[in-house]
Amino acid sequence: MLTLCIAVASCKKDGPGENPTPPGSVRTVRFLLYTDQDFSSDNAVIHFSVFIKKGSVYVFDPTGNNFLFDSAYAPMQIKDIPDAAHKLVVEKKVVGYDDADLTAGFVYEIENVGTSWHIDTSRAGNLLKVIDYNFR
């Protein structure tokens, strides 16, 4: 019986559907916001928010069931978006979604202009995702 258990355990191989991260791993999503443009004369107010949701496609979910994290920055004038040397950094740890693709990104609204976004995905098993957003 012991020999059979050892043989079965030694035959297990990671296949293409296996998750390469150990169970209970902590995934990190790091949001970087900056600009390399000269907006010094742009006084328009902009609202940025960041989010992480379960799934690989951004689909509007009015229930919010798939959102794992969302947070808004304080409103600022476009001219106050920092340069690359002074990036705004937000880091969020995500626990319990090792086997799920995640979608993360920025949503922003410029007052009296409209709303837009910068969205990326993090595949299951990816322990660090950096959303590097150079606002232009």
Image (spheres, rainbow, N blue to C red):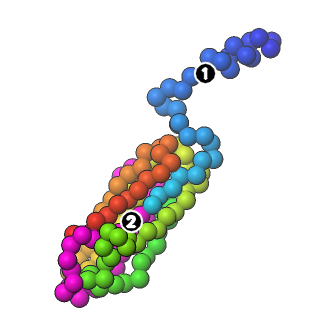
Q: Give the camera-side residue of 18 and 43.
A: 43
Q: Position of residue 94 (x, y in %)?
A: 55, 57
Q: Is residue 49 above or below residue 40?
A: above
Q: Which residue is mark 1?
A: 12
- Give the Cα separation between the discs numbered 2 and 1: 40 Å
Residue drawn at 38 percent across, 51 percent down: 121
Q: Is residue 113 above or below residue 58?
A: below
User: Can residue 116 be seen at all in this image of the molecule?
Assistant: no
Q: Give the camera-side residue of 30 and 19.
A: 30
Q: Identify the amino acid type marked 1.
A: Lys
Q: Going by the image, does 12 lie left or right of 46?
A: right
Q: Which residue is mark 2?
A: 32
Mark 1: which secondary structure? Answer: loop
Q: Is residue 123 above or below residue 113?
A: above
Q: Going by the image, does 69 lie left or right of 56?
A: right
Q: Which residues are magenta?
A: 31-59
Q: Give the camera-side residue of 11 and 87.
A: 87
So how many labels did they put on this image?
2
Which sits earlier in the primary sequence, circle 2 or circle 1?
1
- Name the outermost residue toward the front: 85
Mark 2: which secondary structure? Answer: strand
